[in-house]
Amino acid sequence: MQETVKEDLAASLKGRDFLMLVDYTPEEIRYLIDLAIDLKKKQKAGEVYQPLKGKTLGMIFEKSSTRTRVSFEVGIYQLGGQGLFLSGNDLQIGRGEPILDTAQVLSRYLDGIMIRTFAHRTVVELARGATIPVINGLTDLSHPCQALADYQTILEHKGRLQGLKLAYIGDGNNVVHSLMMGAAKLGVDISIATPEGYEPDPDLVQQSIDHAKETGARIHLCHDPKEAVDNADVIYSDVWASMGQEAEQKERELAFAGYQVNEALAKYAKKDYLFMHCLPAHRGEEVSEGVIDGPNSIIFDQAENRLHAQKAIMAAIM
C-alpha cells in the first residue's frame, strides 16, 4: 500500500466509531488488518509502540467475557494508555440513566469507549451521544472486532483473502453477520449453512450481497452443511446457543443435531482447510474434538489476534 494512500486512510479513521464493518470501506478494513499485523510484529519483537500514551479507554461490560476483556485491557496498556473496567451493574445505566446522558458524561472523562452488550441499539445510542470514538465489543447483532481478527488470521495463514471460500456452519448469529459483511468487503466467498429458522438477518444478508458486487465475493445461504463445506478453504463454527439463549439449549440441540463440524464433514473441504471457532467452544456439540484439537485448527492464533486487531482499531480511531 502506497505511503500517501496509507496516510489518507489513517487520517480518515481518526475519531471514527467502530460499530459495524458495513461502515468501513474495503480499503479501510484492509488497512486495519495490515496495521494489526504490523503491531503484532512490533509486539513480538519487543518494540515499544505507545501512540495512545496518556489516553484512557472505558470498557463497559453488560455481557461477561474472557477474550474481549483481557485483549482490550492488555491492548490499551501496550499502546501506552489505560483501560477502565466498567460493569453495567456498577454504572448508572444499570439503574435507568439514559444512555445518551451516560455517553455525554463519559465523553468528558475518557478518550474512547468499548462496550459489550445485548441490544445493538444500545451501542448506536451510545455512539450518537458520545463525542469520543465508540467501539462495538459485541452486540446480539454484530461482532466486528471478532471478524477483523478472523480475517487477519486467515490472511496470515493463507497469504491472501480474495477468492478464498469460507464455510460457516451453525447459527445465523452476530458472528456470522460480521463474517458475512467482512467477506463481502474483502472479496471472500462465504457459504453459510444453518437449520431452517436460524438463518442470518435478511436485511444484513441483502446488505452483504449488495457490497459483494463491488469485490466479486459470493454470499451463499443453504441448509446443507456438506453443500456449504464443499471445497472450502476455511470452516468456521460457533456455539449453538449464545449468551442469553441458555433457555433454548435443549431446543437448539435438536435443531442443530446435523450441524456438527466433524471429521466426516471436513472431508468435503480442501485438504489444507483451516478450522476456526470464536470460542468458547463446546467439544462434542458444534465441533468434534478431532477437528478443534486437530492439525487444521487455528483457534488459538485466532484468539490471539483479537489483541492485535483491537490494538489496530484503538490506535487508528483514538
Image: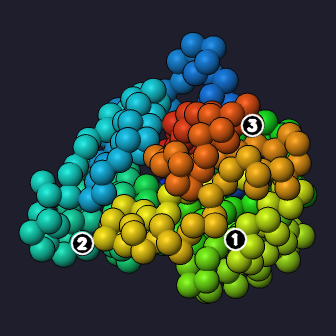
At x 9%, y 69%, the residue is: 95
Does residue 13 appear anywhere in the picture? no
Q: Please give left or right for residue 285 compared with residue 54 in the image.
A: right
Label number found at residue 99: 2
Q: Please give left or right for residue 59 compared with residue 167 in the image.
A: left
**Label 3 near label 2: C-beta < 8 Å?**
no
Image depth: mark 1 or mark 2 in front: 1
Residue 52's place in the image compared with 242, above or below, is: above
* Gap between marks 2 and 3 measured at Cα: 44 Å
**Label 2 near label 1: C-beta < 8 Å?**
no
**Type of amino acid under label 3:** Asn
Q: Please give left or right for residue 111 compared with residue 31 in the image.
A: left
At x 39%, y 69%, the residue is: 250
Image-quadrant location for residue 177? bottom right
Image-quadrant location for residue 159? top right
Does residue 87 appear anywhere in the picture? yes
Residue 110's place in the image compared with 190, above or below, is: above
Residue 207's place in the image compared with 235, above or below, is: below
**Type of amino acid under label 1:** Ala
Q: Residues within 10 Å of mark 3 (few under 14, many from 20)?
A: some
Give the total of numbered labels.
3
Q: Which residue is mark 1?
A: 193
Q: Which residue is mark 3?
A: 296
| Callout 2: SS | helix
Is tag 1's residue or tag 3's residue first in the polypeptide sequence? Answer: 1
Is tag 1's residue or tag 2's residue first in the polypeptide sequence? Answer: 2
Image coordinates of residue 69 in percent, x first then y, are: 36, 42
Quarter of the rendering occupied by the N terminus = top right
**Type of amino acid under label 2:** Ile
**Label 3 near label 1: C-beta < 8 Å?**
no
